[in-house]
Image (cartoon, helix red, strand yellow):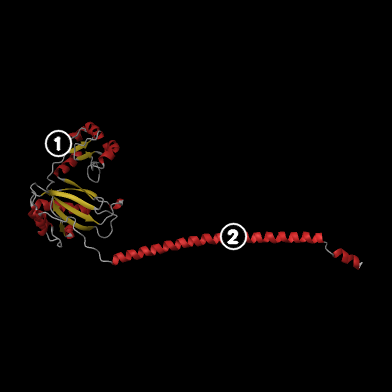
Amino acid sequence: MAKKTEETSEITPEEQAIVEEVIEEIVEDETAVEEATEKKVTAKAGKRSAKAVKEAEEEAEKEARKAEAAEKEDAPKPKQKPRVKKYSKKQKAMREAIDFNKLYTSEEAVALVKEISQAKFDPTLEVHVRLDIDPRQADQMLRASTVLPAGTGKAVRVAVLTSDEKKAAAAKGAGAELTNSEDLLAAIGKGTFDFDVLVATPDMMPQLGRHAKALGPKGLMPSPKSGTVSADPANAVGEIKKGRLEIKNDANGIVHAAVGKLSFKDEDLLANLKAVLNCVQANRPGGVKGTYVKSISVSATMTPGIKLDTAELAKK
């Protein structure tokens, strides 16, 4: 029996070859799996490292820009060169009469402008108010109107759009040059604007909507804020003829307003100037916080600007 068992347990060469082949296949499969796993892990690690390197480079560039900006701030600022390198004799004489480091009162500024002006025509006195606002924000824009007590000194052509014949006749009596609504709408449609101010009643505004692109850029589109949309056009025309002035900021947050001709009496120019400054102060936009008025200057046509003390806003 023992001999039979020993004979049976022996492995033949053919069987040994088969076993070795199976073992080789198993080893090859395990090696392939390990290599695939290693490649996958390496690929993932490579992606992460590239991202990390990129982030590190961006952070380094950011820090470099900050350091460069800090160096520029610490460096001494170059002196600003004058816009005009050479002034004429008249310009030099006018500039020498002004102390640019002084803040003048309204009375001093008006008297000085009249003194230094050398124009051969009747120049216009202007006031420029720099506001600390962001003109891109709707709640920080200034748009209002005021009546200048002494008028503007300019002839203004007023057109009135209304469907009521009685209101049109009243506006004509108040001084409006154009009151025929049909002819006026036809002229506007053709691009003809033979007027300086357009007044409209509320019921006519829908008909003006299609002309907004033509009227808006020219500053002729009626608006309730400027008082040119009114149910009583005769009253609006009367105020415009007396010297109603629209006050609004430009794209840089500066208000420019003409307050009369230099031939006006000092009292009249001062009254008009105070009316403009009071209007600016009274119509402070709701979105403005902190400082509102940064600076005020007065000038006439062809004269340098004279800085006013912002305390002039407090005067009534």
Nearest the camera: 190 or 178? 190
Query: Is the residue 292 above or below the residue 183 in the image?
Result: below
Q: Quadrant of residue 14?
A: bottom right
Q: Quadrant of residue 74?
A: bottom left
The mark that comes first in sequence, 2 or 1, is: 2
Whether residue 21 sits left or right of residue 148 in the image: it is: right
Residue type, label 1: Gly
The residue under the point 21% across, 53% down is 280
Answer above or below: position of 290 versus 180: below
Q: Which mark is residue 289?
A: none
Location of residue 148 in the rendering, given as x and y in whole percent from the top left corner:
15, 48
- Real-space CA distance between mark 2 and mark 1, rounded to the nearest whole angstrom: 94 Å
Q: Nearer the viewer, residue 121 or 73?
A: 73
Quick one: 245 or 214, which is closer to the camera? Answer: 214
Residue 70 seen by the camera? yes
Percent from the top left, x then y, of residue 135? 28, 52
Identify the element where label 1 is drawn.
helix
Which residue reaches farthest bottom? 2
- Residue tagged by mark 2? 39
Which picture quadrant has residue 45?
Answer: bottom right
Q: Residues within 10 Å of mark 2 (few under 14, many from 20)?
A: few
- SS type, badge 2: helix
Looking at the figure, which quarter contains the N terminus?
Answer: bottom right
What kind of residue is marked 2? Answer: Lys
From the viewer's side, name the closer residue of 315 and 80: 80
Q: Is residue 114 left or right of residue 297?
A: left
Q: Which residue is mark 1?
A: 173
